[in-house]
Amino acid sequence: MKNYKKIITNIYKDLKSIDDPGKVANYIPELANVDENNFGIHISTINNEGFGIGDANKKFSIQSISKILTLTLAYKLIGENIWNRVDVEPSGNPFNSLLQLEADFGKPRNPFINAGAIVVCDILMSHLKNPKEDFLTFCRNISNNSSLNYSEKVAQSEKKSGFRNIALCNFIKSFGNIKNDVDAVLDFYFYTCSLEMSCKELSEIFLYLADETYTNNKNENILTTSEAKRINAIMLTCGFYDESGEFAFRVGLPGKSGVGGGIIAVHPNEFCITVWSPKLNPKGNSYKGMLFLEKFTTNTENSIF
Ligand code: GLN
């Protein structure tokens, strides 16, 4: 664990009561019910050591962090063919943007913007018998954690207010890049976003991206080294929408955010770290989460660069 405990504790104390200019997401009404003062951090190393502080064990809505899990399962199911349906280029646009899709003939720029994740969900719909159940089982199996679950409330709340996602899915379908029924794909997408996990659970589930030899307790290897490289590369270049450059610049790790205020970051061959603070900056990324991780890689002098 090197000196991580001390450094994490010190940054946690420094940031706990700062003036946070961020705002809790409220375009999904249910997300606005969270206590905005929650602040948790957890690190898990590939040697099975862990350390958490603050609200590290409270479950929250992981939202777009689930895009890594849906991509992982779809990649396992259809292999390299997946890149015919979704690209691997940074979009430089907000997570829910429709702008580039027309020029790109319905092929989303990457799997970590909403358009891309909706196409990934469509792929899963075509290959899974019971998509919601099978995806949940997949997530539970990765980290041997049977307590993982969707939030019915959050999924239903997003379903009622998901106008941009409904537009995105229909628009992509008009180009032929959605094969299943639009309502069914969206329903599945909303459920994947509603998954709830704590910082500790997130740091543990994403160890498969940090550890090439990771196997769950069924002795299953989640990804090959090459597949993990690719997912980490897309996280580094596309994990924070139109702030991906900024995150790489300030933090220097592959990562992924969600509008629930969670951020996970991976140091390949070392650890996975998660921060949760619900107040978001204007780009939809946790204000304190980004600040914490910037200080963490600066003070430990340990990023991928
Ligand atoms: N469920 C959210 C949405 O589709 C996820 C967005 C996010 O976390 N950036 O709008």
Image (cartoon, helix red, strand yellow):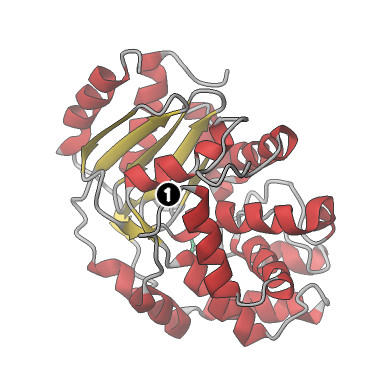
Q: Can residue 286 be seen in this view?
A: no
182 relative to 26 in the view: left or right: right
Query: Residue 17: where, in percent of width, then height?
Result: 14, 38
Residue type, mark 1 in image: Asn
Q: In which quarter of the image is residue 19?
A: top left
Residue at (55, 59) in percent of width and height = 138
Q: In which quarter of the image is residue 24?
A: bottom left
41 relative to 234 in the view: left or right: left
> For the view shown, which residue lies furthest in the front direction?
218
Q: Is residue 36 visible?
A: yes
Q: Which of 258 and 54 lies nearest the eye of the viewer?
A: 54
174 relative to 222 in the view: left or right: right
Residue at (21, 55) in percent of width and height = 36
Q: Which quarter of the rendering shows the N terminus?
A: top left
Taking 69 as reference, is 13 above or below it?
Answer: above
Residue at (36, 26) in percent of width and height = 49
280 relative to 193 in the view: left or right: left
- The crowding category of the residue bearing disc 1, from other C-alpha atoms within 10 Å (few below 14, some 14 to 19, many at least 20), is many
Q: Which quarter of the rendering shows the C terminus?
A: top right
- Beta carbon of the mark 1 residue lies under 8 A of ligand 1: no
Query: Residue 243: where, in percent of width, then height?
Result: 53, 43
Which residue position is annotated with label 1? Answer: 285
Taking 18 as reference, is 241 above or below it?
Answer: below
Query: Residue 214: where, in percent of width, then height?
Result: 57, 35
Taking 148 as reference, is 129 above or below it?
Answer: below
Q: Which of 281 and 223 lies nearest the eye of the viewer?
A: 223
Q: Quadrant of residue 47?
A: top left
